[in-house]
Image (cartoon, rainbow, N blue to C red):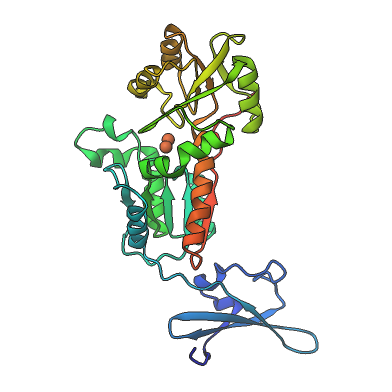
Amino acid sequence: MKKAKRIHWYTTSSLPASLRLLKFPSVLPLRDNRINSIIRFTSGDQLLSDQILFNDATVNKTFYFKVPKVSSMKALDFKEYLEKISPGLSSEEGFRFGNPNLEVKGILVSWMATKEAIEKAIDEDCNFMIVHEDLFYPYEFQRDETFEKYLTWSVNHTRLKMLAEHNITVFRAHGTLDRLCILDDFAETLGLPEPTVRKGYVRIYDVPSITVKDLALDVKKKLNLKAVRVVGDFDREISRIGLPWGGLGLSLNIGFLEELLRYAPQVLIAGETDEYAMYYALDADVNIIETGHSISENIGLKGFVEKLKRDHPETKIVFYECEKPWRFL
Ligand SMILES: [Fe+2]
Ligand SMILES: [Fe+2]
């Protein structure tokens, strides 16, 4: 390693933004008026350490501490990584905003690039966001060919403004993560056995006979929820479960529900569903237990973040949990 050399001297009043964003130990708040100055040591492009000089009544004290290594990852490297662990990215996956050649300072993974998630990325100095859901509304299949007009929609515009102002690049990883971990991690958390049917996105589980009510209470407990919505007869005994996780229980995905019904499940444990789909289930004589869209997918996303950290130990990676957007009153 090259010998460290002193290259910058900053007083606290002229501290550059990049230094302010570093995560100093909480005992050393940067705005502490005991701090006189900060010296940054580098070797080549590598940041080695920051030294803080304190204004003390008696003597200038010097503190050294380790600064996390700077990642040399580019946003494009993540795309290559995902391609390696995927049978192939679909058209609904890929960069959605920003610069694929971006030098990644930190990654924030979240279910959706909501305003709060983007704020968290800004706070954490993460300039690369990996999200599971799309950045823009409406759904891709609901858009016409004039894409630009959707950029003026209030939420799309707000998100874009925040991302542009903070030079954040966004990548959407959808089907790859559903297949890799989201679907099966949800099933595992529910304590379901090995699926009887595992075909594409279809999962059917055979379990010992249980009433819908007891199953719903068990789901509630395992996911630590205050309530779940239940469609159909509470007292019905069931032994075959279908799993339309995420948004696959919504009426806009009714074709998928129909595919599940071909395997004769008696109850569906859904992520998110709606009344339109609920009537379909009722007329098909199938119960639904609804948990939540983000709830059913956050579990697998968290697991993915752990894998990402193991595979990229040099890179700062943060998980932001998009909580369900409503409360009970
Ligand atoms: Fe999903
Ligand atoms: Fe989803």
Residue 55 makes an appearance in the image: yes
Q: Nearer the viewer, residue 248 or 285?
A: 285
Q: Nearer the viewer, residue 173 or 23?
A: 173
- Residue at the spot x=52%, y=48% of the render? 303
Question: Vertically, is 241 above or below 19?
Answer: above
Question: Vertically, is 194 above or below 268?
Answer: below
Q: Quadrant of residue 216?
A: top right
Left or right, residue 69 beside residue 100: right
Question: Vertically, is 47 above or below 313?
Answer: below
- Residue at the spot x=50%, y=19% of the render? 240
Q: Nearer the viewer, residue 15 or 253?
A: 253
Q: Quadrant of ligand 2?
A: top left
Residue that lies at the very extreme toward the right in this rendered image: 58
How far from the left and from the top, in percent, is residue 297?
A: 49, 38
Left or right, residue 280 beside residue 29: left
Residue that lies at the very extreme toward the left in this rendered image: 145
How far from the left and from the top, in percent, is residue 39?
A: 58, 84
Q: Quadrant of the C terminus?
A: top right
Question: Vertically, is 68 above or below 229?
Answer: below
- Residue at the spot x=50%, y=22% of the render? 241
- Residue at the spot x=32%, y=53% of the render? 83
How far from the left and from the top, in percent, is residue 306?
A: 53, 54
Badge count: 0
How far from the left and from the top, in percent, is residue 188?
A: 55, 36
Left or right, residue 102 beside residue 122: left
Q: Quadrant of residue 327?
A: top right
